[in-house]
């Protein structure tokens, strides 16, 4: 039986998490697959996937959001097959940034100018869709470090926007 890997949180800060991965077995490990999950504005679960080669590993994941719960799951790729999943949860330190105040204005039938307030020197994600279900499951999206962006949309549709 292949055991799940051990995920140990080494450290965390406002914008990063460092963790180690190891197996408590003599089975040869060729690497790990790690998923980091977090929820964006209660509407959208985000995921980042890392594919890591080798037996032992210490990883640092950066560009995270302060005071946000993250779930890290991992499984090992071994000579006998894939291991079961392991999970850990961690909340980054600091104070979560305030939600930006978004304004969306139609420029014409296929372009919408989105602008918002918020801190400088961060990356913003703009998500938009024609329904709440689509906004949750598979929205259109774009990122920018600016405080405005013009997005192209389909004519004769109503859209919901999040930033």
Image (cartoon, helix red, strand yellow):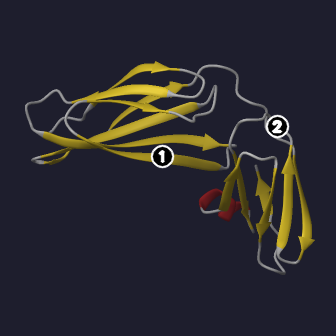
Question: 1 or 37: nearer the eye?
Answer: 37
Contact (Cβ within 8 Å) of mark 1 with mark 2: no
Q: Quadrant of residue 28?
A: top left
| 1 vs 2, front mark | 2
Identity of the residue drawn at 84% across and 57% down: 114
Instruction: Give neighbour class at mark 1: few <14, some 14-19, many 20+ (Cα, 10 Å).
Output: few
Q: Position of residue 29 (x, y in %)?
A: 16, 39
Give left or right: position of 76 versus 68.
Answer: left
* Residue 43 visible to an observer of this rendering: yes
Q: Looking at the image, which residue is at 85% across and 46% down?
A: 116
The image shows residue 81 at horizontal and vertical percentages of 15, 50
In the depicted view, which residue is nearer to us: 71 or 123? 123
Q: Which mark is residue 48?
A: 1
Which numbered marker is on residue 118? 2
Q: Position of residue 22 (x, y in %)?
A: 23, 29
Q: CA distance from mark 1 to mark 2?
A: 24 Å
Quarter-of-image position of residue 85: top left
Q: Is residue 76 visible?
A: no
Q: Residue furthest bottom?
A: 156
Q: Position of residue 130 (x, y in %)?
A: 75, 69
Q: In terms of secondary structure, where does tag 1 sit?
A: strand
Image point (57%, 24%), residue name: 92
Quadrant for the N terminus in the image: top left
Lateral position of residue 120 relative to residue 10, left or right: right
Category of crowding for the residue at label 2, using alpha-carbon neighbours closer than 10 angstroms: few (below 14), some (14–19), many (at least 20): some
The image quadrant that residue 40 belongs to is top right
- Furthest residue in direction left, as rendered: 26
Q: Residue at x 66, y 59 (%)?
A: 141
Mark earlier in primary sequence (1, 2): 1
Classify mark 2: helix, strand or loop.
Answer: loop
């Amino acid at each position: 039986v292949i055991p799940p890997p051990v995920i140990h949180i080494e450290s965390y800060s406002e914008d990063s998490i460092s963790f180690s991965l190891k197996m408590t077995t003599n089975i040869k490990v060729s690497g790990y697959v790690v998923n980091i999950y977090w929820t964006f504005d209660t509407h959208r679960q985000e995921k980042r996937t890392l594919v890591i080669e080798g037996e032992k590993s210490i990883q640092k994941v950066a560009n995270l959001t302060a005071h946000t719960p993250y779930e890290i799951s991992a499984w090992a790729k071994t000579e006998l097959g894939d291991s079961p999943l392991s999970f850990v949860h961690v909340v980054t330190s600091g104070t979560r940034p305030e939600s930006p105040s978004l304004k969306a204005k139609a420029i014409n039938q296929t372009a919408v100018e989105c602008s918002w307030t918020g801190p400088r020197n961060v990356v913003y994600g703009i998500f938009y869709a024609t329904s709440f279900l689509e906004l949750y499951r598979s929205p259109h999206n774009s990122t920018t470090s600016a405080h405005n962006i013009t997005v192209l949309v389909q004519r004769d549709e109503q859209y919901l926007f999040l930033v």
